[in-house]
Amino acid sequence: MYFISINIVNIDINYINRSILMVKKEELHTLIHALSKSEKRYFQLFCSRESRGSNYLKLFEAIESQEKYDQEAIKEQFKNEKFILQLHVTKNYLRKLILKSLRNFHANTSKNIELKDILHNIEVLFNKELYIHCETELKRANNIAEKYELFSGIVEVETWKRKLRQVMHPYDYTSFKETLTSQENAIEVLKNNNEYWKLAVNTSISLFKEDEKRIKKHALLSSPDDALSLEAKVLFYSTSSLYHINNKNALKAGIALYDLIELLEKHPNRINHEPGLYASSINNLVSYLIFIKKYKEALELIQKAKRKYDNWKISTENRVLFKQILRTYNIELEIY
């Protein structure tokens, strides 16, 4: 978890505006070419269920076949089709259709996505006055949000608990107060997370300043007990490591990184939910071990990480995770 500040000078605003327009024009082309084979197959099936899906599928396949986006060629290819008269509208709807397809395709790959789907169910059921069904969905949502520390989700869950209680038991003020207190607690944790994020960013900025002035120790780095969530504790150890690096204390920087790995391994559910966090933390510790020339320990840690990777369902659709794991293997090659 390292942050690098990049200063940009002599900015050509006109050039940037032209670039933004070009990127916007080619946005759909970029999105389509970023899809994996599995995602494309799923979209084709998904699109076939749409009443006007054939037109969107035609446009999808035409753009997919282009190595570089050529709008004039698209207009020529579909000059006899009605949808070409409003190409920008068709492209916009196709983009929305692709994103909807991707949400469905990846529905079970993230607890955050799963929670949002359940919250959507709750809103639909509530508007249909199916309150018992709402309660069932709320229990599911509450379990996921609490188990995986999705605190913004907890705030939403508590909002729906209060709304549901108001229509089913309009005078249960004690229950209303309980939901509001639960919301306040979740918001406090979110504020705490935000403070640790600010500290991590500011520490990273200071680390890469040319004057190399030592960073003063912040009160939040005194103890991990001040971090109210696993996310905040991860930030505590990561930032502590940066702080000790800045103050030329390699030993304490390493201890902080080892403590971070130990913390994550005590929460296997969170590793499975956010595997990229574990992989990046391993990579940071391995990089540290290489820096202090402890190659044997670095290789042992890599082998340990690879055993965990073997148990994960790694897909090229998750490019962020894929790159972190690839980095582990690249570091191993560098050591050899």
Image (cartoon, rainbow, N blue to C red):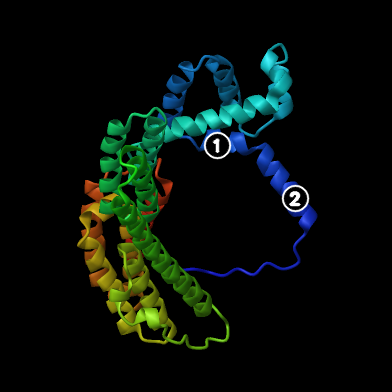
**At x 43% / y 20%, what residue is drawn?**
45
- Label placed on residue 165: none
Q: Please state, as top left, top right, bottom left or bottom right, where the C terminus lies in the image.
A: bottom left
Residue at the image position 25 percent from the left and 52 percent from the top? 147
- Residue 147 versus residue 241 in the image, above or below: above
Dot 2: what SS?
helix
Identity of the amino acid at label 1?
Answer: Leu
* Residue located beneath label 1 in the image: 31
Q: Residue furthest front?
A: 171
Above-or-below relation of 90 to 184: above
- Whether residue 329 is visible to the viewer of this picture, yes or no, is no
Q: Against 121, is 50 above or below? A: above
Give the residue pinned by disc 2.
Answer: 17
Residue ID at (77%, 59%): 12
Above or below, 256 relative to 76: below
For residue 239, which quarter of the picture?
bottom left
Q: Give the amino acid type for the residue marked by disc 2 in the picture.
A: Asn
Q: Nearer the viewer, residue 39 or 240?
A: 240
Q: Position of residue 237 (x, y in %)?
A: 33, 73
Position of residue 258 measured from the top left corner of the image (x, y, whole percent): 26, 72
Left or right for 17, reference 47: right
The answer, for residue 56, to whether it is visible in the render is: yes
**Taking 96 as reference, is 226 left or right?**
left
Relative to 174, 38 lies left or right: right
* x then y, percent, for residue 245: 40, 81
Query: Which element type, helix, strand or loop, lies under badge 1?
Result: helix
Total numbered badges shown on the rendered structure: 2
